[in-house]
Image: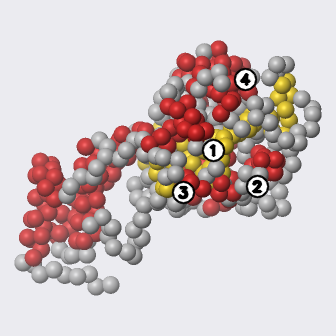
Amino acid sequence: MLRPTVPSAIVPSTVAKYRAKTCSRATRRYGRSTTKKLPQDVNPKGVFACNELDLKEVQVYGFDYDYTLACYKPSMDYLLYNLGRDMLIQKYKYPEGIGNLEYKKDFAVRGLHYDIEKGLLLKLDSFLQIQFGTVYRGLHPVPDDEVLRLYKNRIIPIAYVEAPNKHSHDGPHRTKMVQLADLFSVPEMGLLCNVTEYFLRNHIDYHPEILFRDVKNSVQSCHPIMHGMVVQNVSEYLEQNQDLKRFFVRLKKANKKMFLVTNSPFHFVDIGMKFLVGDDWKDYFDVVIVQARKPKFFTEESRPLRIYDEVNKTQLWDRVTKLDKGAIYLEGTVKQLQDMTGWRGHQVLYFGDHPYSDLADVTLEHGWRTGAIIKELTHEISTLNNPKFKENANWLQMLTGLIEEHQDYEGPDVQTVLDEWIKERDKLRNEIKRVFNEQFGSVFRTYHNPTYFSRRLFRFADIYMSTITNLLEYSTHHTFYPRRGVMPHEYTSYFV
Ligand SMILES: [Mg+2]
């Protein structure tokens, strides 16, 4: 293709005009503040819509417990990390030296993938592209050229990350990468990276998959111990939320049905809910199901519901034929819940923090409406609202526009300026990434695209918010409308 040549009289003036913006930060800043108005702050208590949702149609509100109704303090991450680390030494006989490795807060973010063959932790975007600069072996970034050598490409084949249709009869399929989409998995990733780093530093040979499985099993096998410790000192681990009771009262006043489906055991949920809502918390719920074994609760056809005997702290063998308010049930399936209550499809709005095990199947298989509780939004929104961040993001957009517009002009002067712009843009992109998380950046974005995590979230959640009680900002007959996004072939913006 012929590149447009610009009359020499025009080029210097174009270059001079934009060089003024790039050569001095002060000039640039002046240029920025006068050329474009910065956006208004995002409401940290907002509820954000991916799909239109009319709350008038919702008769039944369902909730997960951990990280949906119950939000944990950072002390929970330390607790799980420490328990998992000690279990690795005691049960799996890992080197004693691992006992000295402390939890590194804010090292990892949710939604990363772990390559179980190569032993790398990395961030993928919605096109399955690796975000360069976010590939870690232990605590160290892997250089881009090594990443390209390892993967031969920056796009990962889909078979690496997604198993074929789960209903296929090809037998169990194991992918080469696993995604850590659960908030409880953040300390797990921290432990994985710390132990990898220890092995690398001490020249100890290890198999990444064995390490991954051991870390996972260690941390997960500590959950019952964690439950016992939280029960003894609930305020140490659980964030109080004064608005939760008010939220429940409002739903009851609006004649909404409520249910709880959690994988956690009753004694743990009971103490937490008493702390959050009060001793009468069960009065708000029409159905309570604990140890539900999600996602199996949503996918399996037949697993009988059982009754939990609160007095003797045991499960009963009686057949369950109806669901009584005030009783506690165990296991079961969503089919029995639907059959015994008559609750169906779009009448039900279910809230969870896990985009797959809480939200995917209920949306895809049962047509329930869904709300995602994404704790990380608090940090993401406070970053977005920082004036310095707004200024940088705005200038990044403008610089990209300048590069796009002038890239086809020819001549050495133009190239010099373009190179300067590209260099500055790369620097700015990294600054913007680091303010979210030093290693991995934002949970929601890579440099150019939504993350793999975001894509799944937006697909499976009708609405999402940082905390369940953000819904108090809206009435119980509110309709959430998704933003009319601009497609690439449409106008530049609807906000002109
Ligand atoms: Mg949860």
- Which residue bears the numbered disc 4? 267
- Which residue bears the numbered disc 2? 173
Which residue occupies the foreground of this view, 316 or 165? 316
**Which mark lies nearer to you, 4 or 2?**
4
- Which residue bears the numbered disc 1? 256
Q: Position of residue 342 (x, y in %)?
A: 77, 52
Q: Farthest residue to the right: give it.
A: 318
Q: Amino acid at mark 2?
A: His
First reached walking from the N terminus: tag 1 or tag 4: 1
Q: Is residue 204 above or below residue 393?
A: above
Q: Amino acid at mark 1?
A: Lys
Q: The C terminus lies in which quarter of the figure?
A: bottom left
First reached walking from the N terminus: tag 1 or tag 2: 2
**Which mark lies nearer to you, 3 or 2?**
3
Secondary structure at numbered mark 2:
loop
Q: Position of residue 430 (x, y in %)?
A: 34, 48
**Which mark lies nearer to you, 1 or 3?**
1
Mark 3 to mark 4 CA distance (whole Å)? 35 Å
**Left or right, residue 227 beside residue 106:** right
Q: Position of residue 293 (x, y in %)?
A: 76, 40
